[in-house]
Image (cartoon, rainbow, N blue to C red):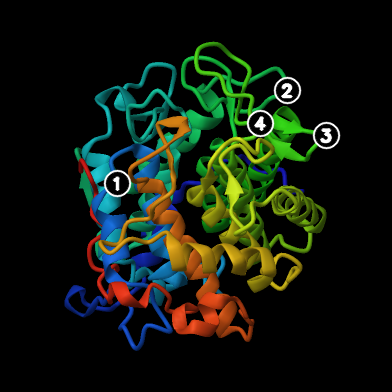
Amino acid sequence: MRTESLLLPLTLLGRTVLAQSTTTSSALGRASAPVIQSLAETIPDDLLAKVRDVMEQTWENGTKAQALLEYAYQDFSPFSPTFGNALTDISLSQSIPDEIITIARTTLENRPASSNSSTGGSAINGVGIGSLLEDGSSADPASLGISVLLANASAAVGTQEVKNVGWGEAAESELRYLLERVPRNSAGAISHRADQPQLWADFVYMVPPYLAYYGYLSSNQTLLQEAYTQCALYRSGLQDTSTNLWRHIMEGTGTADPGLWATGNAWAAAGMMRVLATIQKSPFSDQMSSQRADLQAWSEEIINAAKSRTAKDGLVRNYIDNSSTFEDTAGSTLLAAVAYRLATMNLTTAHVGFANQIHSTVAARHINSTGYLTGAVDPLSFGKQGTYSPEGQAFVLLMQAAYKDYISGGGEDKTSAATSGKGAGWIGSVGVSLLLALGLGFW
């Protein structure tokens, strides 16, 4: 393993490289939403509209950004064969999506003044160490970090500042906050909570992918290793060894949920897959083969445990091991996305049947006429079925992005929804309206 510092001057690297471009600003193109060719290639715009419109919480907006990258702007997703380093690839730096830049800008506009304090040391150019957003969770704001990293890499706006803070400065401040300020448990796991050491399965989707993406852009193997290490520590702290499923919340005081929550398991498996994909695309992939193998195995542990406990229509229950809890479309949908990604990354197709059944059930029964996912858990009340789920809307997009990649790569879906014309395009009756309205909620 390389022994360099965890930190690289990301801001300076991005701006120095981008300064080499001689392309005029008027010619700087940006990635636009994909042209709708047919319902066999997309999901209805009504559904994508809801993903844009209903996001309110920090993690919801971060998950929305990731869903957009995977579905609409794949050059910036490590799951895509066209993924590249936007800091060093001029063509990518010139095509950072406006939508992602807007998410980053809104994040910095809401960045707390306390994060600019130099108390306890400064990050870079006098900008203090602190979270991107004021939040009781130390992890959730990190879900927006990749958007900030991409804004920093942008040839169009990379040198701009928001509230006198540059993109790269804010990204490094967030990184150092996670690594140096957030409490850890006795094993070294970075806490999901800002005020005390506490482990939530959700953390694995929020923080390790940010560490890995930062490490990829800055060619920093130590950060990629830290992303892996945090996944390993969370698995050790949360896994129920009798089922291989993860408990939702452990340690600390206050909020507690030791149950095997479906969405928590989905967060964990999906986060580990993002770290795996990022390591695989990095220059250190061969050196980190054992880490890649672990991340695959740990994701499959969850998928195998979930698919052995499905209800009759293929969905998993809100608490996967508890047959008295309702069938949850949110956690099921994100687990399906993980299963498809295992296939699209050429790792295994063993779980595609599980994913296809979830995809079929959600398509046929759980998208209403206005584009909302139904039957999803209330993300603010873990044991209750909600009216709608903002994160569930993004999960549908993540599942459909992975499904689309699976089908376009030659994969098969012989479920009833696919054979009745609801497969790759599904929810065809809703129409083509989802990609144009995934707004920023309270932003």
**Circle 4 residue:** 247
Circle 1 sits in a helix, a strand or a loop, which is it? loop
Residue 77 visible, this angle: no
Residue most extreme to the left: 26
Q: Is residue 269 left or right of residue 254?
A: right
Task: Tell me the distance, in whole angstroms, between the alpha carbons under discs 1 and 3.
Answer: 36 Å
Give the residue at x 30% y 27%. Answer: 116
Please report whichever mark, 4 or 1, sits nearer to the chain's N-terminal start.
Answer: 1
Q: Quick one: label 1 or label 2, which is nearer the N terminus?
A: 1
Label whose residue precedes the other's in the sequence (4 or 3): 3
Mark 2 or mark 4, which is nearer to you? 4
Q: Which residue is mark 2?
A: 187
Label 3 Cα crowd, 10 Å radius (few <14 / some 14-19 / many 20+): few
Disc 1 to disc 2, C-alpha distance: 34 Å
Residue 198 is situated, as x and y percent measured from the top left of the image, at: 58, 21
Distance from disc 2 to disc 3, alpha carbons, whole Å, reads 22 Å
> In the image, what residue occupies the spot 35% across and 21% down?
118
Task: Characterize the local packing of mark 4: few (<14), some (14-19) or many (20 or more) Cα atoms within 10 angstroms.
Answer: many
Residue 129: quarter of image: top left
Q: Could you tell which of marks 2 and 3 lies nearer the N-terminus?
A: 2
Q: Where does residue 33 sit, x and y in percent of width and height?
A: 30, 74
Task: Please state if 365 lies on the left or on the right of 47 as rendered.
Answer: right
Q: Amino acid at mark 2?
A: Ala
| Residue beneath disc 3 | 242
Q: Nearer the viewer, residue 303 or 285?
A: 303
Q: Nearer the viewer, mark 2 or mark 3?
A: 3
Amino acid marked by disc 4: Arg
**Residue beneath disc 1:** 55
Q: Mark 2 and mark 4: span between their CA atoms? A: 17 Å
Identify residue type, mark 1: Met
